[in-house]
Image (spheres, grey):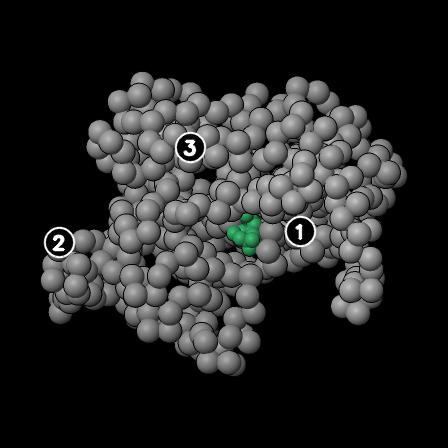
Amino acid sequence: MKYKILIVEDNKKLACLFKEALGDEYDIRLVHDLKQAKSCLDGIHGLLLDLQLPDGEGLSLIRPVRQINPSCVIIVVTAYGTIQKAVEALKFGATDFLEKPVDLEALVQRFQDLFPLQGLQDLVAESSEMVEILQMADRVASTPFPVLVTGDTGTGKDVLARYIHQHSGREKFIGLNCASVPHELADSMLFGHLKGSFTGAIETRKGLLSAAKGGTLFLDEIGELPLSLQAKLLRFLDSGCYLALGSSQESKSDARIVAATNKDLKKAVKNGFFRKDLHFRLTTFPIHIPSLMDRKDDIIPLVHHHLERVKQVLGRRIRLSDGAKELLLDYYFPGNVRELFNLLDRTALLTGGDITHGSLRPFLSPPPEDKPAPGDFWSESRGHVLKKEKELIGAALTATGGNKAAAARALKVSYKTLFNKMKKMGL
Ligand SMILES: Nc1ncnc2c1ncn2[C@@H]1O[C@H](COP(=O)(O)OP(=O)(O)OP(=O)(O)O)[C@@H](O)[C@H]1O
Ligand SMILES: [Mg+2]
């Protein structure tokens, strides 16, 4: 079964670009206005939604979609300067937003990360480290305490935050990536504002803390939260109260905060980028997810779990040879679980058969100490590199039947990079 994604975007060229970037892995339907969109909501697993459509606001689609499929992955695309709309979208139940011009790679990665979160059974935890983490998460889930999830990129912080929410008995889950919010708007996004409190505040708006009443507010990349707001957040965590911008009257919310970061917050505290008191408050329940190489017992179960998914998409069973298993167990996974899944996707797609030591090996990054020093790199012949690049691109294009977006994903380069390289090489 392929996940069905509905793309609602009135710019036809852009809609096609989104489709190509997402590739054959999904069953994609393109529509260009609200009217058409409304007639194809049944059965979709994902929605990529432009907010400004010729016949109305894309926002109006979010509620009906949520009603039909509560776990639908809804990604909203906003034009520059309309980020307030994105906040509204999150309040209505959008999963995330991306600003135009959309980074296609980020878009593909977002769907790839979010689809597996549709069902709870999807969280793999076999290693003793992960079992302990889940026990901890189970204990804290139903309490109102804030939780801080830390861990390297791709270790599963998003997954765990959602797991905690799903076991909390709370209703709404609103996620905000603090890194994607312009500093000057972050205050109003989180805490809301009164009409006239700043230029452009033409009406009073509630913030995400208010929208997340009775639910969970997931603050991803919390290390990016501006210092001025850290004090405000701390006050909220201590008292449940906050002041909307321009208001002198306190508001209350019982939203539960789950925060995540892949940064070393202790270091950020030391360097003055993160408030010590907020760090202290958030670490009442710290949960650290170890890197994948430090919990190797999860690797093979994660492989089986993901290959099951690949089987549904490709329609054929893919096995992992003993040699490939050994290679994975020895690998250091700088991108953790995300990298493992991407590796399996690419190898499965490019080799067409089972995953063996030989087919997997070229996709692994060399260990850091084996990486050539800058001097060595420049001494390499550029012509040699170009020849190799051409070879790799050719092989990827052949394997993907000429689909550039799929080839780019397989090669782990951005669509734009592949496009530019092909142009230069005259391919
Ligand atoms: N324990 C797990 N079981 C199943 N899938 C997992 C697990 N951990 C991570 N994944 C998968 O790995 C991918 C990356 O996970 P996730 O997005 O949660 O990472 P992250 O820690 O939030 O990374 P980042 O710091 O880059 O935001 C997702 O596709 C997710 O479903
Ligand atoms: Mg994340």
Give the residue type that dot 2 points to. Glu
Q: Is residue 158 above or below residue 309?
A: below
Q: Residues within 10 Å of mark 1 (few under 14, many from 20)?
A: many
Q: Which mark is residue 336?
A: 1
Q: Circle 3 sits in a helix, a strand or a loop, which is it?
A: helix
The CA distance from mark 2 to mark 1 is: 44 Å
Percent position (x, y) of residue 407?
65, 35
Residue at 41% over, 25% down: 30
**Residue beneath disc 3:** 13
| Residue 161 horizontal side relative to residue 412, left or right | left
The CA distance from mark 3 to mark 2 is: 34 Å
Q: Is residue 222 above or below residue 58?
A: below
**Residue beneath disc 2:** 203
Give the residue type that dot 1 points to. Asn
* Ligand 1 lies under 8 Å from the Cβ of mark 1: yes
| Residue 202 figure quarter | bottom left
Residue 404 or residue 251, whichever sits in front: 404
Residue 288 or residue 179, whichever sits in front: 179
Give the residue type that dot 3 points to. Lys
Percent position (x, y) of residue 81?
29, 53
Disc 2 + disc 1, Cβ < 8 Å: no
Percent position (x, y) of residue 11?
36, 33
Residue at 17% over, 65% down: 198
Residue 215 visible here: no
Percent position (x, y) of residue 338?
63, 46
Disc 3 + disc 2, Cβ < 8 Å: no
Q: Residues within 10 Å of mark 3 (few under 14, many from 20)?
A: few
